[in-house]
Image: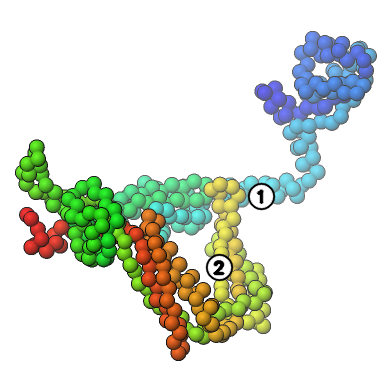
Amino acid sequence: MVLKIYYFLFGHMRVFVKGFSYPRLLNMLSFRGIYIWNICEEKGGISFFSGAGNYEEVKALADKAGCAVMCEGERGLPVFLRKLKKKHMFCIGAAVFALSLLLITRFVWLVEVEGNLRVPTGELLEFCESYGLSYGALKSKLDTNMIEREIKNGFEDISFVSVSVKGTRALIMVSETIPLEENAILTEPADIIADCDGVITRIVSTRGKPFVREGMSVLKGDILISAEEEIKAEQEVLGIKTVRAEGKVYGKTVDEYSFELPKEETYKKYSERSYKQYQIEIFNKKFSLKIIKSDTNCEKCDRIESKKQLRLWNDIYLPIIIDCEEFLPYDDIKRNLDSETASLKARRIVTARIVNSYEDDSDVLDVGIEIKEEKDCYSVKAVITVDKQIGVLRAYSERPKESREL
């Protein structure tokens, strides 16, 4: 492997030997210590690779062995450099590109934030900009440890932060604290109560005292799993302690959902043609690449904007952003809604509500939709029977005093 690298740096050649006494030539080359590789037997002779400076010696040995030698081409770095001597503009361009790349990679061209939910990204980026971390910042002047400390001191909702710069990309990873109200409910005693009326279908209690069983009817606000837990010793109740109740309670409930559909509706009819406007942003300077013609009707159109920052590889981003804004012209078309179309639309609306309103572990048992035609609209009433979790936490301190045992 080392020899192959050596011959790549100093050049090598492909040699074709013609004749029937090439075994003798190979023995002579081995005796002289001339390195050859990739020996292949071909029609009328053999071919192999050797160092470019060995040609004269190989030829002299071939004459002694009674073989004809032909160099089929040189390869390696020297050959490449000789070709570059004739391409001055290419060499200049390559040098300028290398220097430009070296200069560009000394700066930060992309700052991203991950892990934040409550802290706005824009506010965090603005805060970091005041300490030198921003688009176009010189990497050698960034003190990531200092920025991490300042972020933790400046934002109470952030418990952990990591600032890393790789390539031309700066990544701010944050972990937020648990909100005070959530942290309090995780520690203080709490009951699990019903958030709606229903019939209990199943209950799994891991902490606290269950107040209901399967088949019982409950009303909204009834206690399902009590925070008051008995302290027992050999079947004897020694006292009662308050805990944070834990468990899942499912119940069969009936939800009603009403809405109206106007008989006359307006929908968008999009044009077959769309228009795009491109802008290129270089070092925060915007240049328009295409201007929409004045006769283009964009009074009624939807706009879709997309941005893409160019990068060479992995985390090497360039200070070049392509901004594409697509315009989709449309006309407002009015149409009357017949009963059949209204029924299909109502079912789609109810289905979307079911998908968005219920958790994955809920089981929709029945859906009844009643549609009444009014003067100017269709009145829709949906009755949804569902088996779902109906238990929610309520702080023990909010329980009425008359229902407490302590």
Secondary structure found at label 1: helix
Q: Amino acid at mark 2?
A: Glu
Query: Which residue lies most toward the front here?
Result: 215
Which residue is at a point 47% across and 74% down the rendered structure image?
346
For residue 251, above or below residue 229: below
Which residue is at a point 36% across and 62% down the rendered structure image?
386
For residue 353, above or below residue 71: below
Relative horizontal placement of residue 70, taking residue 35 as reference (left or right): right
Q: Amino acid at mark 1?
A: Val
Which residue is at a point 36% across and 46% down the rendered structure image?
145
Spot occupied by residue 80 in the image (x, y as percentages of width and height):
76, 37
In this figure, which residue is indicated by the disc labeled 2?
305
For residue 10, above or below residue 29: below
Mark 2 and mark 1 in contact (Cβ < 8 Å)? no
Relative horizontal placement of residue 155, taking residue 101 as reference (left or right): left
Residue 224 is at least partly visible in this image: yes
In this figure, which residue is indicated by the disc labeled 1?
96
**Between residues 13 and 303, which one lies in front from this camera angle?**
303
Which residue is at a point 87% across and 23% down the rendered structure image?
42
The Cα–Cα distance between marks 1 and 2, rounded to whole angstroms, is 34 Å
Spot occupied by residue 174 in the image (x, y as percentages of width and height):
37, 51
User: Dot 1 surroundings within 10 Å: few (below 14), some, or many (20 or more)?
Assistant: few
Spot occupied by residue 378 in the image (x, y as percentages of width and height):
45, 82
Q: Which quadrant: the C terminus?
A: bottom left
Residue 266 is at least partly visible in this image: no
Q: In the figure, residue 237 lies in which quadrant?
A: top left
Spot occupied by residue 231 in the image (x, y as percentages of width and height):
10, 44
